[in-house]
Amino acid sequence: MKPAEPSLPSFKVSAPLSGQLANLARGRALVIGYFESRRCAVVTGDFSVSWRSSRPSAGFIALAAVEDVPLYVDRRLLNVLRLAELKLWPGGLFRRGTPSIRLARPELWLQFLEGPVVMGPRLPS
């Protein structure tokens, strides 16, 4: 028997952004990915949030639209986003037209960065 797949993450929209997402999108899809940087055995990283007119590459999965805006997420982020309870907020000072992300459980993001998806499998000592 095939194991059940985990549920897909759901996204909430903060009150300050609520009702504005479709206007910001202007017919584009919201795409959420991530990037990481490694220096001296330390990994840092953040989410990437962007608007795209076309469907992203095969590494992304379509989720339920948010306020009628198509939403795609890097499939490697599915578990952390589902567990960390993502909420979309208005963008910051330099990205006013693109939402930002806040997590109710940000410690799960740090665990993700230290985990096998980013760091690779741990070798025995």
Image (cartoon, rainbow, N blue to C red):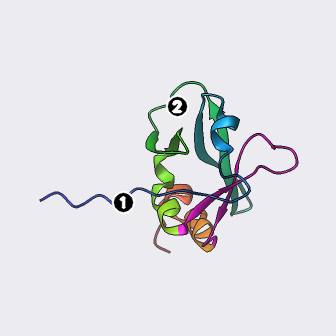
| Quadrant of image for the N terminus | bottom left
Question: What's the amino acid at mark 2?
Answer: Pro
User: Could you tell which of marks 1 and 2 lies nearer the N-terminus?
Assistant: 1
Q: Is 23 placed above or below 80 here?
A: above
Question: What's the amino acid at mark 1?
Answer: Ser
Residue on which disc 2 sits: 56
Residue on which disc 1 sits: 7
Residue 43 location (% of width, % of height): 68, 60
Find the residue positioned furthest to the left. Answer: 1
Q: Residues within 10 Å of mark 1 (few under 14, many from 20)?
A: few
Element under disc 2:
loop
Find the residue positioned furthest to the right. Answer: 93
Give the main secondary structure of the magenta stretch. Answer: loop
Q: Nearer the viewer, mark 1 or mark 2?
A: 1
Residue 63 location (% of width, % of height): 44, 45
Magenta stretch, residue numbers: 84-106
Q: Which mark is residue 98?
A: none
Left or right: 8 as drawn, with respect to 33: left
Element under disc 1:
loop
Q: Residue at x 73, y 42 (%)?
A: 98
Find the residue positioned furthest to the front. Answer: 19
Q: Residue at x 81, y 43 (%)?
A: 95
Residue 53 location (% of width, % of height): 59, 25
